[in-house]
Amino acid sequence: ELKVEQNPLFLSMQEGKNYTIYCNYSTTSDRLYWYRQDPGKSLESLFVLLSNGAVKQEGRLMASLDTKARLSTLHITAAVHDLSATYFCAVDDSGSRLTFGEGTQLTVNP
Amino acid sequence: SAVISQKPSRDICQRGTSLTIQCQVDSQVTMMFWYRQQPGQSLTLIATANQGSEATYESGFVIDKFPISRPNLTFSTLTVSNMSPEDSSIYLCSVRDYGYTFGSGTRLTVV
């Protein structure tokens, strides 16, 4: 059974600081997704990582995938308040389903 | 990517009743997925719905409680049956296209 673990689960940051969220998974997969969820809202797709070594960047967020280590990271650069949300990683299990991590609740403080 | 219209967006229901949630996709998709997100939790897959066949349910979810219909390649429904307060959650449908796209969610409160 595929397991996906995120850490930290809760993250409180100061504006302007950098931090990384980690996503570890237990079985071989080369498809990993990052989503953002605002309170009471659905999931917004951030990144689709489809191969080992994939790196994608959008604004202050950068995601990477190391399939050999079964690890993805979501790096936040110079955080701003608007980034406050819950971030989920999800791993594609053989193209037939997604298994989600527990989520990281990010709060960016002024 | 696909655009999904999910209805209703929210509902408050009496225990013992049933609610049917609908998802309409703007393109034909083979696989549709139904997830549950309990308060403060992550998403858990309920079932996978393929057109023309019975839905495949995950461990802990049964057809009598969560019947699913998939009459064509653009539409699916999930019914939450004989509801109890423990069913209060957000329910989301999803389709696999380039990645996985999610509907806007249905926030269900059972009183």
Image: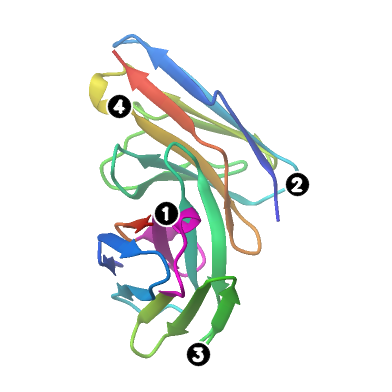
In front of the other: B24 or B57: B24
Mark carried by residue B87: 4
Q: Check residue B74 for magenta coloring.
A: no
Which residue was labeled with disc 3? A53
Picture residue at 38% right of the left edge, 12% below the top: B13
Chain for disc number 4: B
Which residue was labeled with disc 1? A84
Picture residue at 41% right of the left edge, 58% below the top: A87
Quarter of the image for residue B25 reads top right
Magenta segment boundaries in residue numbering: A75-100
Left or right: residue B28 versus residue A44 is right
In front of the other: A65 or A68: A65
Indicate the secondary structure of the residue bearing disc 4. helix
Disc 4/disc 2 C-alpha distance (Å): 30 Å
Q: From the image, state whether disc 3 or disc 2 is nearer to you.
A: 3
Q: Amino acid type of disc 1?
A: Ser
Disc 3/disc 2 C-alpha distance (Å): 32 Å
Q: Amino acid type of disc 4?
A: Asp
